Image (tube, rainbow, N blue to C red):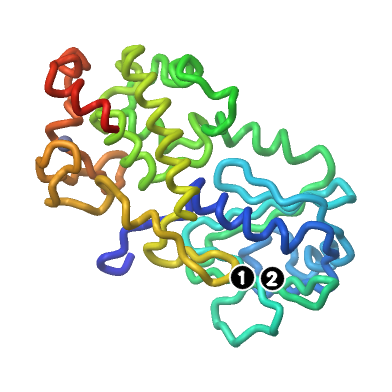
């Protein structure tokens, strides 16, 4: 990785922001012509074959599950898109400018184009037949964190008997779908839980705080249309603004918003990890009931 690269990938708020912009552009439109110029995007299938299969399909809905974009066609088929590290989609009414990193273009039946760009080429497009999507995702993804079915008790079940650090458990998409390095660090700060705490060690109060923190952090990210640090862009070329509001991510040495202690950086599960060494204590939560902390708690 180039120096200074911090490995940001689009997470749930970024993918949801892309989905919200694409939905009105794609819904009801037919894929008139499809070009796929990168065999990695659709492997093990042939780009020309996948492109031919997509031509003529009419979009019924654009959905999201975890970090996946789901383009549902009226035929019952689904195009499942994962942006991975550097994938982005761009919609244009006025033709496309040259781009060496463009991997695919969809011409819609109203003459506009949706272009897929990916510098590092880890993104994937997978065309699934009717009925294949749910079993495919079920093996890969846990609960949807903004879904009503996701409760603190449910989170507790997912973390039971897991000795891995809580940060690693939350990065695992089978625990919760859609969280990545940024929003996990932010949620743990909000919940005042140290990233290295064993997942199974969280008590009920901590699970409640974490559950609320996960939702608040993701909702915040969506409201800011995600965070733009490197390659992420919205389909109209715009950027998100969540990066201006990070509490810990990438803020090593800066004062914690809650207590003023400099934010520390460590590594958990091979990922750069930022936390407040005063607010996010590594021992069990008994000290969280200390008066000075509970007073601060109300401002979060
Ligand atoms: Zn702090």
Q: Residue at x 54, y 69 (%)?
A: 118
Residue at the image point whose x is 74% and y is 40% from the top: 133
| Ligand 1 rendered quadrant | top left
Residue 43 appearing in the image = no
Can I make out residue 275 in this image? yes
Q: Looking at the picture, does residue 59 appear above or below residue 284?
A: below
Of the 4 image quadrants, the one containing the C terminus is: top left
From the viewer's perspective, is residue 104 above or below residue 138?
Answer: below
Q: Which residue is identified by label 2?
A: 114
Q: Helix, strand or loop at disc 1? A: strand
Q: What residue occupies the far left of the structure in this picture? A: 261
Instruction: Report how many numbered discs are placed on residues in the image.
Output: 2
Q: Quadrant of the N terminus?
A: bottom left
**Which of these two is toward me, 74 or 45?**
74
Decide if ligand 1 comes within 8 Å of the CB at mark 2: no
Q: Is residue 37 left or right of residue 166?
A: right
Which image quadrant is residue 286 in? top left
Residue at 62% across, 41% down? 65
Instruction: Name above or below for residue 58 compared with residue 119.
Output: above
Secondary structure beneath label 2: strand
77 vs 277, nearest the viewer: 277
Residue 147: image x %, image y %? Answer: 58, 30
Crowdedness of circle 2 by 10 Å Cα count: few (<14), some, many (20+)? Answer: many
Q: Position of residue 193 (x, y in %)?
A: 26, 28
Rate crowding at label 1 as few (under 14), some (14 to 19) or many (20 or more) other CA atoms within 10 Å: many
Q: Which mark is residue 187?
A: none
N-terminal-most mark, 2 or 1: 1
Residue 90 shows which numbered tag? 1
* CA distance for labels 2 and 1: 6 Å
Q: Are marks 2 and 1 in contact (CB under 8 Å)?
A: yes
Q: Give the image location of residue 70, x and y in percent.
A: 69, 49
């Amino acid at each position: 990785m180039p120096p200074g690269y911090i490995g940001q990938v689009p997470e749930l708020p970024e993918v949801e922001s892309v989905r919200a912009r694409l939905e009105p552009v794609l819904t009801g439109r037919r894929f008139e012509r499809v070009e796929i110029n990168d065999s990695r995007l659709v492997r093990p299938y042939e780009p020309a074959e996948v492109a031919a299969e997509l031509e003529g399909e009419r979009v019924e809905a654009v959905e999201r599950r975890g970090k996946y974009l789901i383009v549902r066609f009226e035929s019952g088929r689904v195009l499942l898109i994962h942006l991975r590290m550097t994938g982005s989609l761009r919609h244009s009414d006025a033709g496309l400018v040259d781009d060496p990193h463009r991997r695919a273009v969809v011409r819609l039946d109203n003459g506009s184009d949706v272009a897929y760009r990916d510098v590092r080429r880890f993104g994937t497009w997978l065309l699934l037949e009717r009925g294949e999507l749910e079993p495919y995702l079920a093996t890969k993804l846990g609960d949807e964190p903004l879904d009503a079915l996701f409760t603190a008790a449910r989170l507790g079940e997912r973390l039971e008997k897991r000795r891995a650090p809580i940060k690693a458990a939350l990065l695992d998409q089978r625990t919760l779908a859609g969280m990545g390095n940024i929003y996990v660090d932010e949620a743990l700060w909000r919940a005042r839980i140290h990233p290295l705490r064993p997942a199974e060690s969280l008590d009920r109060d901590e699970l409640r705080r974490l559950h609320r923190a996960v939702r608040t952090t993701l909702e915040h990210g969506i409201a800011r249309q995600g965070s733009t640090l490197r390659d992420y862009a919205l389909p109209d070329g715009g950027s998100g603004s969540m990066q201006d509001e990070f509490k810990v991510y990438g803020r090593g040495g800066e004062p914690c918003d809650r207590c003023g202690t400099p934010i520390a950086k460590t590594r958990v599960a091979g990922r750069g990890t930022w936390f407040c060494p005063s607010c996010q204590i590594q021992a069990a939560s008994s000290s969280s009931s200390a008066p000075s902390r509970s007073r601060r708690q109300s401002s979060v």
